[in-house]
Image (cartoon, helix red, strand yellow):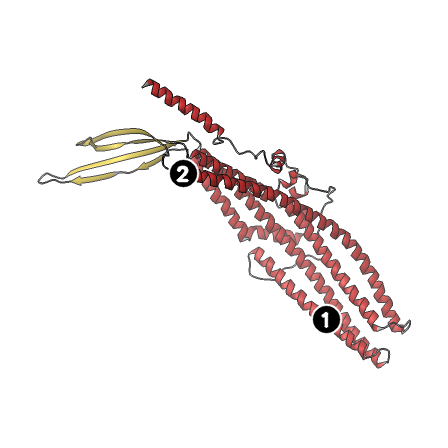
């Protein structure tokens, strides 16, 4: 008997050592065969650089008072953000439940019964038992469940931050879209008024024999073309207002923007964003937590191969002791332990482990792709900002030259010299309008690039 006990103990110790080697107890670490993961792991725990563009508070980036008020309103009312916060609450409750799994479960189940046989009087029996059951976490089943729940909780927090960042960026983008459309609409309406006057001027010139009927028709056609473009701008403006209303979680309405609304970004003097700043993105952090959760699921699948140890205890007050009824009753206490080993479910456990390993590899692939995608988004945003800034300078010079061209051709037409035709005036005026609209569109694109760069670096705190 002693030899059997010693053999069992030795087997238990050997199994425990083997289990430790199977990654059933260890905390999640980034896989060594992932170069991106290892680079990420080196910088993820470093102190955050509060001066980096993506780590600035959103109030430091967006300073327009009207926009600031709109962002606050969206953060208070937006349904997507509220749902993301509820997901955090759900994950927190699940984490709390996983932690409480370490504690014994208690149940109070009072019961009573009466029986009568032949002419004998009723005999009453009763029990007031308190039952306790406690699973001893020898092989890390509960531990991995708790750690997986913690990873899911942190992931839900990261998703909440990602939704918050998206809402801030969406409000800012919509705001500057409204500003651009308002400016384009104002420019087009002013131009339409000038063309209306121009049509009358062409009619006067025709009566004076300065131009022919073709010039009058061309001026009218251009006037109607501008009116048609105004209807397109009004449609786009209405859609942008509706988008802002949805972000604010209110019924459709018209939103006001500040005069001369503009957005610029601090100069970023580098060709690429280091991994440390990519690690600040909530979607990258969420992908890391998803990988950690998959790791703990795999560890839990390994633990399913080994026995579970449960200790149960029952105690209480009863008048049924043995097979006899005793009044008054007395106290009783029962204590038991059970070891449950999987014998016929090994095939199912093997299948679950294989599936868990495959899901863990999927999570690793998704994590690496998230980092690469984040790097591409930052690169696109930086290039867009730099090139639109450069383009803005060229367009400003173009507008200046076209204004002079319009002035010269109109003056020559009025003087009737140099053989200047109305077609030249028309061409110059059309080019000027398109260039002015392009300047507004470029400013809008530059603002969008700033917002996208801030968001792509994890901004929105």
Where does the image place residue 452, in percent across and percent down from the top left?
A: 66, 49
Residue positioned 77% across, 54% down in the render:
391
In the current view of this chain or complex, which residue is farthest to the right?
A: 418
- Classify mark 1: residues with Cα within 10 Å, few (<14), some (14-19) or many (20+): few
Nearest to viewer (mark 1 / mark 2): 2
Mark 1 lies on a secondary structure that is helix
User: Which one is in front, 168 or 341?
Assistant: 341
Q: Please identify the residue farthest to the left as the structure is shown.
A: 119
Q: Residue 20 carries which label?
A: none
- Return the residue at label 1: 225
Q: For the residues marked 1 and 2, what is the alpha-carbon distance in whole angstroms?
A: 74 Å
Along the viewing direction, whichever of 259 and 246 lies nearer the viewer = 246
**Is 424 situated above or below 257?**
below
Mark 2, other Cα within 10 Å: few <14 / some 14–19 / many ≥20: few
Farthest-out residue, top? 2
Precedes in sequence: disc 1 or disc 2: 1
| Rendered location of residue 136, percent (x, y) | 39, 30
Which quarter of the rendering shows the C terminus? Answer: top right
In the image, what residue occupies the spot 70% across and 52% down? Answer: 447
What residue sits right under mark 2 in the picture? 347
| Residue 240 image position (x, y, % from top left) | 63, 60
For this rendering, which residue is in front, 111 or 73?
Answer: 111
The reply to whether the C-beta atoms of the residues labelled 1 and 2 are less than 8 Å apart is: no
Quadrant of image for the N terminus: top left
Where is residue 161, by image quadrant? top right
The residue under the point 50% across, 31% down is 26
Side of 155 where 4 appears, left or right: left
Q: Where is residue 443 in the image (x, y as percent from the top left)?
A: 73, 55
Residue 218 shows in the view:
yes
Secondary structure type for disc 2: helix
């Amino acid at each position: 008997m002693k030899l059997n006990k010693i053999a069992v103990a030795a087997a238990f110790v050997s199994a425990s050592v083997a289990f430790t080697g199977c990654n059933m107890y260890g905390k999640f670490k980034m896989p060594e065969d992932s170069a991106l993961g290892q680079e990420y792991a080196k910088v993820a725990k470093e102190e955050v650089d509060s001066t980096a563009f993506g780590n600035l508070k959103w109030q430091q980036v967006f300073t327009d008072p009207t926009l600031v008020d709109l962002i606050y309103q969206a953060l208070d009312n937006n349904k997507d953000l509220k749902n993301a916060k509820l997901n955090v609450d759900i994950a927190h409750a699940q984490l709390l439940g996983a932690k409480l799994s370490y504690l014994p479960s208690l149940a109070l189940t009072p019961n009573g019964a009466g029986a009568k046989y032949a002419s004998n009087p009723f005999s009453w029996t009763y029990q007031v038992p308190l039952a306790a059951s406690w699973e001893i976490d020898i092989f890390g089943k509960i531990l991995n469940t708790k750690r997986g729940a913690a990873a899911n909780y942190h992931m839900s927090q990261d998703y909440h931050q990602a939704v918050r960042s998206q809402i801030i960026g969406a409000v800012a983008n919509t705001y500057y879209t409204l500003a651009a459309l308002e400016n384009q609409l104002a420019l087009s309406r002013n131009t339409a008024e000038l063309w209306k006057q121009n049509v009358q001027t062409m009619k006067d010139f025709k009566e004076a024999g300065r131009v022919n009927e073709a010039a009058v028709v061309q001026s009218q056609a251009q006037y109607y073309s501008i009116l048609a473009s105004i209807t397109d701008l009004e449609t786009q403006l209405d859609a942008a207002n509706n988008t802002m209303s949805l972000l604010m979680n209110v019924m459709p309405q018209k939103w006001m923007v500040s005069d001369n609304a503009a957005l610029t970004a601090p100069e970023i003097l580098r060709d690429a964003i280091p991994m440390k700043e990519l690690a600040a993105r909530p979607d990258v952090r969420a992908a890391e937590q998803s990988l950690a959760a998959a790791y703990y699921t795999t560890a839990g699948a390994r633990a399913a191969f080994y026995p579970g140890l449960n200790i149960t205890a029952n105690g209480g007050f009863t008048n049924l002791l043995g097979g006899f009824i005793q009044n008054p009753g007395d106290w009783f206490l029962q204590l038991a332990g059970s070891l449950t080993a999987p014998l016929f479910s090994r095939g199912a456990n093997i299948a679950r482990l294989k599936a868990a390993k495959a899901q863990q590899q999927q999570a690793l692939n998704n994590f690496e792709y998230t980092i690469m995608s984040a790097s591409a988004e930052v690169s696109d945003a930086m290039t867009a900002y730099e090139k639109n800034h450069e383009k803005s300078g060229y367009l400003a010079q173009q507008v200046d030259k076209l204004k002079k061209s319009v002035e010269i051709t109109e003056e020559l037409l009025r003087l009737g010299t140099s053989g200047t035709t109305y077609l030249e005036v028309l061409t110059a005026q059309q080019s000027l309008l398109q260039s002015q609209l392009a300047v507004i569109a470029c400013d809008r694109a530059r603002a969008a690039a700033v917002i996208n760069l801030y968001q792509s670096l994890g901004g929105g705190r």
